[in-house]
Image (cartoon, coloured by chain):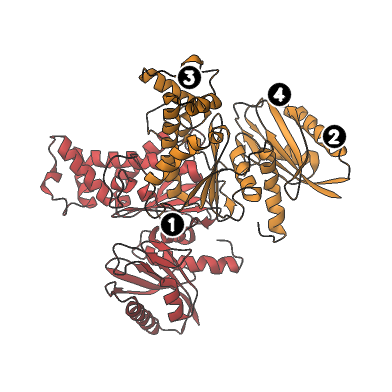
Chain colours: A red, B orange
Amino acid sequence: MLELIVGIDIGGTSTKFGLVDTAGKVRIHSSIATDNPDINVYIKDLAKAIRNAADSLDEPVEFIGVGVGAPNGNYKKGTIEDAPNLPWSGTVPLSDLLNKEFGLPVQLTNDANAAAMGEMMFGGARGMDDFIVITLGTGLGSGFVANGQLIQGHDGHAGELGHIAYKIGGGRYCKCGKKGCLETYVSATGLKRTVYKLLADHHMDSELKRYSFDDLNTKMVADAAKNGDVVAQEAFEYTGKVLGAKLADAVGHTSPEAIFIMGGLAKAGDLIFKPTIKHFEKNLLHIYQGKIKVLPSELNSTHTPIIGAASLILKDIMTKKGLVI
Amino acid sequence: MLELIVGIDIGGTSTKFGLVDTAGKVRIHSSIATDNPDINVYIKDLAKAIRNAADSLDEPVEFIGVGVGAPNGNYKKGTIEDAPNLPWSGTVPLSDLLNKEFGLPVQLTNDANAAAMGEMMFGGARGMDDFIVITLGTGLGSGFVANGQLIQGHDGHAGELGHIAYKIGGGRYCKCGKKGCLETYVSATGLKRTVYKLLADHHMDSELKRYSFDDLNTKMVADAAKNGDVVAQEAFEYTGKVLGAKLADAVGHTSPEAIFIMGGLAKAGDLIFKPTIKHFEKNLLHIYQGKIKVLPSELNSTHTPIIGAASLILKDIMTKKGLVI
């Protein structure tokens, strides 16, 4: 009997899932739309798709647990809370619903925490007890591991670095209602806002002038920077300056061995890593300087969120078996 | 046989120690000067004083461990590293030396981490798994607990909030070599600097004009504020504004249940707590608002550092016995 974990990654448009073996390999994967406003129907549809996927495998399968990464996922409560991009309002008891459906242990957390678990189990953080994962997408997410454990926080909401202040009480408006939040500067959207700010403030030529805000994306800015476009280069430099400074602050909190960066903006490579590391080192207290690695995530497959979600269950199983991870 | 833990608090001027029972009560305490540049002689003197104290008790005593709080104390390595106010330069293997002397388990950490352990064992954080302790003295120290464990960090240097940036790349000079560090604003010294800044910028009457920087202390500023001195009141307001904003950032990292503040500045009571809490709430992400307690430490005896140091050993013992703390 092949033991498999169900890894589920709930996104605003689609819910991806995979059946992951205990070595972290995705044996089969598929998805359903995240569009049914009736959560009970959604769960039934998802369970059906998962069972169909299992049936299509060559060997008999036993599910041993369900791991879920979801926006606003609360690990301690097993709930999704007020996720603006999902069709269910209020608090959704997702773990309970999945447990009722499958009769198996369910663990749920937010996307960035799931990513951190994946990095620890199968990525660059293998063997590390203290590290941080930063996810750069539309917003900025983060997951903290200390003493070999994910920091969930008292209410399950640890690691909200997207909404710490780059500019206290001022700066750019954030959709959370505050101003100056880190993700308004450091994220795919933050990069676009910086490009627009530079185009507003300066009169340099730039190929980025031809794109609307809606059309502009990280890849366009990266390509322009590689072509020598000064605005694009300066946008990355500024983004790295902000990220580096705030990562130095994060080190003052938990003193990690390494910081892993993943997501679309991380794919810009040196364009984002060079200024980030330069300003990170500049802002670090001397006792940390030159000691903390800032690295691209080693999990850059499209399956990363699924593997991360499955890792929540895997870590538990391996800990119970007394296996070092 | 009375089981006692040796709790040691190493300060720049004197080394205080106490023999602490497993209920956290200090049975006897004393001190020696921290002035012998020969670390081996210092250890012998300290051990002698400790044994003399034990001999003076009415009942026979068995030491079960040694806990030490020291500036720049590194828990993971058991060393004191480049402590500017201690007579020993470089790295001092203090745990090894004490272990050799007593043949007992030794645990060492910095002052703020020891304070956090004390708060967890015997203070307001009893029963809490996730909290932060801030110590406000000449500088600003901090200790983080998550998942019921002290966060030490990869290299034992977690919780250096004194040197995170209030003003990135600018602001007040710090003795660490950087600028804009939190403790240049929020500490006994930071408060004095704020008073001097206000006196430099404004022309209001203030009773604080009569004190030199060297003579001025927190109590004088607090007394003046209570007498209606506008400069003194504004100095506390500004200090709370800075502290509140940066504590809101800290919450975004570890999502604690409570934040405990101790040390001289905390004794100013409402003068510091009111503006701190006001600006803390204002800067918090909505999901945290109104949920996180900012409280004075419940450990305000002069023995707090000794009890905190002993708690390092006590926690281990109780964990091994399977006792919930």
Residue B113: mark: none
Q: For the residue marked with disc 3, what is the amino acid? A: Leu
From mark 3 to mark 4, how far is it between C-alphas?
Answer: 39 Å
Q: State the residue position of label 1.
A: A157
**At which x and y percent is residue B50?**
80, 36
Q: Which residue, as the protein is rendered here, is positioned at the far front?
A: B227
Q: Quadrant of residue A280?
A: top left
From mark 3 to mark 2, how far is it between C-alphas?
Answer: 46 Å
From mark 3 to mark 1, how far is it between C-alphas?
Answer: 44 Å
Q: Quadrant of residue A243?
A: top left
Label 3 or label 4, whichever lies nearer to me, is 3
The answer to whether dots 4 and 1 both sit on one chain is no
The reply to whether the C-beta atoms of the residues labelled 3 and 4 are less than 8 Å apart is no
Tell me the element at label 4: loop
Label 2 or label 4, whichever lies nearer to me, is 2
The answer for which chain carries disc 1 is A
Q: State the residue position of label 2.
A: B52
Q: For the residue marked with disc 1, what is the amino acid? A: His
Along the line of sight, the residue nearer the viewer: A232 or B149: B149
Q: Quadrant of residue B231?
A: top left
Along the line of sight, the residue nearer the viewer: B163 or A175: A175
From mark 2 to mark 1, how far is it between C-alphas?
Answer: 50 Å
Along the line of sight, the residue nearer the viewer: A196 or A177: A177
In terms of sequence position, does the residue under pointer 3 or pointer 4 come before the other?
Answer: 4
Image side of residue B85 versus residue B4, left or right: left
Residue B208: mark: 3
Q: State the residue position of label 4.
A: B37
From mark 4 to mark 1, how far is it between C-alphas?
Answer: 47 Å
Label 3 or label 2, whichever lies nearer to me, is 3
The answer for which chain carries disc 3 is B
